[in-house]
């Protein structure tokens, strides 16, 4: 078997990451292990993040995780960037308990850590765990609020979703397209057409009506509430349209 000088292997790994050749990058890990070498935490975090971008690359992420375990890199709590991507990996595998154990081992979980846990619970339909985590988060951003509002709406807790949006408005933390999309789901399910009108007014106030995601959601919401004329008027005023609208 040909030998691979250690510096060449590290350079090869970095080149693979630069060009997006994830399979070859992962193949390099056992060769490094045989040389007694470990890539730095930032490189491993980047590799894992790239592997998590596509469901097809999830097996590669599993091999990265195996390398981390066999090389002893998980004996101590990983650095926050690496740990955050490991949290996402566990949830994508459907292993929330593994994610929870890692989260508890983190010395200083950051906002991204909390949001990753929150999104993971929401994706798996674990609403109770998501809400409990949300309520004890030391800091929240618009991503945190959007995730929780949409999770409540998808779980059928429409009143709670609207109530959470009201809190978000009081705190003046800002909005984005996902905020209003989740809220409109709740409004339609509640059958509260006046709430749809209130959301429409808020969208106009913050200047988001040109966002095709929001305008399409409003058109659909008006239609489902039986306000076909309002839906048609808004549709005609849209500067751009997609298939959904």
Image (cartoon, rainbow, N blue to C red):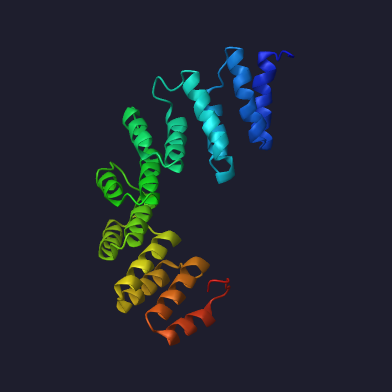
Query: Which image quarter: residue 43?
Result: top right
Query: Which image quarter: residue 190?
Result: bottom left
Q: Would residue 30 be seen by someone viewing this image from the given angle?
A: yes
Quadrant where the image shows the N terminus? top right
Residue appearing at x 30%, y 58% in the figure: 168
Q: Residue 205, how many percent across, how many down?
A: 39, 70
Q: Residue 202, how many percent across, how many down?
A: 37, 70
In the rendered view, tell whether residue 201 sits above or below residue 13.
Answer: below
Residue appearing at x 33%, y 58% in the figure: 149
In the rendered view, tell whether residue 198 sits above or below residue 180.
Answer: below
171 relative position to 91: left or right: left
In the rendered view, tell whether residue 24 sits above or below residue 185.
Answer: above
Residue in front for this viewpoint, 207 or 128: 128
Residue that protrudes farthest toward the right in the picture: 2
Q: Residue 153, how many percent across, how many down?
A: 34, 62
Query: Which image quarter: residue 39?
Result: top right
């Amino acid at each position: 078997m040909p030998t691979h000088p250690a510096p060449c292997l590290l350079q090869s790994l970095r080149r693979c990451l630069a060009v997006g050749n994830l399979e070859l990058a992962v193949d390099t890990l056992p060769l490094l292990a045989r040389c007694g070498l470990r890539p730095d935490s930032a490189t491993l975090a980047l590799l894992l993040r790239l592997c998590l971008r596509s469901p097809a690359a999830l097996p590669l992420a599993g091999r990265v995780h195996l390398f981390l375990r066999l090389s002893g890199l998980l004996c101590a709590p990983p650095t926050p960037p690496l740990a955050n991507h490991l949290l996402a990996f566990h949830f994508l595998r459907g292993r929330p308990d593994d994610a929870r154990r890692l989260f508890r081992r983190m010395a200083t979980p950051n906002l991204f850590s909390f949001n990753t846990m929150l999104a993971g619970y929401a994706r798996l339909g674990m609403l109770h765990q998501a809400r409990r985590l949300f309520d004890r988060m030391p800091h929240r951003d618009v991503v945190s609020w959007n995730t929780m509002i949409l999770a409540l709406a998808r779980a059928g807790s429409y009143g709670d979703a609207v109530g959470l949006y009201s809190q978000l408005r009081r705190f003046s933390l800002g909005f984005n397209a996902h905020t209003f999309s989740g809220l409109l789901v709740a409004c339609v399910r509640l059958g509260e057409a006046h709430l749809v009108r209130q959301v429409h007014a808020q969208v106009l106030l913050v200047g988001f009506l040109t966002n095709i995601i929001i305008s399409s959601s409003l058109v659909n919401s008006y239609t489902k509430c039986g306000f076909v004329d309002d839906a048609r008027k808004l549709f005609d005023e849209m500067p751009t349209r997609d298939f959904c609208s």
